[in-house]
Image: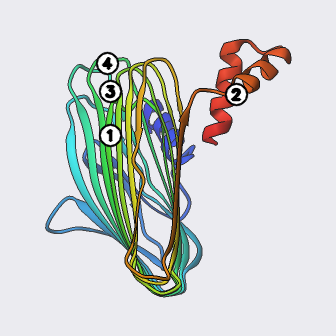
């Protein structure tokens, strides 16, 4: 494995080498390694680029890593990954895409991930996006996520984009059954002239279903961000949307949370806040010996943690 591969794996999947357990590593639109286990099968799709990940019912304390690496300028790809999590399973899925672009052509990774989470199953999904390289070519990532939670299923989804992605459009759709629970956490930072848009729609259909959507972002330089999370209560359910952003320099940020209740027992709340770094926090850290730049970094790191 080359040095740049290891650096990208560390950034997007916290890996220092080939992972233990099930994994599928994709590099420059080709397979760079795969391993299935007794309970987690990874199968190549026959009709389009992508894989099926099938997790047996009752599987616990296992994980699957599916990082994507792009190290050549000019690559543009679309992949389709489907996850089938069996009843009663409890697993960790670590995804993520790293683009190292040292050329002058655009490198782009688009993906459609569909999750079918069985009754009583629990899945924690972590997806990190990262870009680097000294080239002038764009680094573009457009993920689409579709989630179906059956009765009593739980999905915790964490998406992170902190550095180097010039343009991204994130689209997420979720439907929840009876007593299903969804927790979606998004952390994002843009700089330069980067553009980021996030569109989410969560349909709470089942009685007792619940959703928590949290977005935290920092906009720097001339970057632009738009957040549009929507929670729709179609039954006796609970949902909470929270969007918090720090705006700096000449950045532009729009937060458009929306809630809709189609049932008298639906309880849905939203809140949004955009503002500058707290001056009192900045002053306090500076009095402790930090420079203004160091203090800003500490505040931002803590905000996005």
Q: Which of marks 3 and 2 is nearer the N terminus?
A: 3
Closest to the observer, 246 or 300: 246
**Dot 4 and dot 1 residues touching (CB under 8 Å):** no
Foreground label between 1 and 3: 1
Rounded to the nearest whole Å, what is the CA distance between mark 3 and mark 4?
Answer: 6 Å
Q: Give the labeled residue for mark 4.
A: 135
Foreground label between 4 and 2: 2
Position of 151 relative to 4 (above/below): below
Rounded to the nearest whole Å, what is the CA distance between mark 4 and mark 2?
Answer: 29 Å
Q: Give the labeled residue for mark 3.
A: 101
Q: Give the labeled residue for mark 1.
A: 168
Position of 108 relative to 207 (above/below): above
Callout 4: 10 Å neighbours few (<14), some, many (20+)?
Answer: some
Determine the secondary structure under disc 2.
helix
Specify the label residue 151 is tagged with. Answer: none
Determine the secondary structure under disc 1.
strand
Callout 2: 10 Å neighbours few (<14), some, many (20+)?
Answer: some
Q: Earlier in the sequence, mark 4 or mark 2?
A: 4
Q: Give the labeled residue for mark 2.
A: 298
Q: Where is residue 210 in the image (x, y as percent from the top left)?
A: 53, 74
């Amino acid at each position: 494995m080359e040095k740049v591969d290891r650096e990208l794996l560390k950034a997007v999947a916290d890996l220092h080498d080939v992972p233990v357990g099930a994994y599928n590593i994709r590099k420059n639109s080709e397979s760079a390694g795969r391993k299935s286990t007794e309970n987690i099968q990874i199968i190549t799709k026959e009709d389009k680029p992508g894989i099926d990940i099938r997790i047996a019912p009752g599987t616990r304390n296992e994980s699957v890593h599916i990082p994507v690496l792009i190290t050549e300028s000019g690559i543009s790809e679309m992949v389709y990954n489907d996850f089938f999590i069996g009843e009663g399973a409890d697993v960790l899925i670590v995804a993520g895409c790293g683009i190292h672009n040292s050329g002058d052509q655009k490198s782009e990774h688009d993906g459609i991930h569909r999750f079918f989470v069985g009754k009583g199953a629990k899945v924690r999904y972590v997806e990190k996006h990262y870009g680097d390289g000294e080239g002038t070519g764009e680094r573009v990532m457009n993920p689409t996520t579709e989630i179906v939670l059956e009765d009593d299923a739980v999905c915790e989804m964490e998406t992170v984009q902190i550095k180097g992605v010039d343009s991204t459009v994130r689209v997420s759709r979720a439907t929840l059954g009876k007593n299903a629970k969804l927790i979606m956490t998004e952390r994002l930072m843009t700089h330069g002239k980067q553009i980021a848009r996030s569109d989410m729609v969560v349909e709470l259909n089942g009685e007792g279903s619940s959703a928590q959507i949290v977005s935290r972002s920092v906009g720097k330089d001339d970057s632009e961000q738009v957040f549009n999370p929507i929670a729709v209560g179609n039954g006796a359910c609970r949902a909470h949307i929270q969007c918090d952003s720090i705006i700096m320099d000449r950045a532009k940020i729009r937060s458009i949370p929306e809630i809709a209740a189609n049932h008298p027992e639906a309880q849905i709340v939203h809140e949004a806040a955009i503002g500058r770094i707290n001056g009192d926090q900045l002053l306090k850290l500076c009095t402790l010996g930090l420079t203004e730049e160091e203090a800003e970094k500490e505040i931002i790191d803590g905000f996005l943690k």
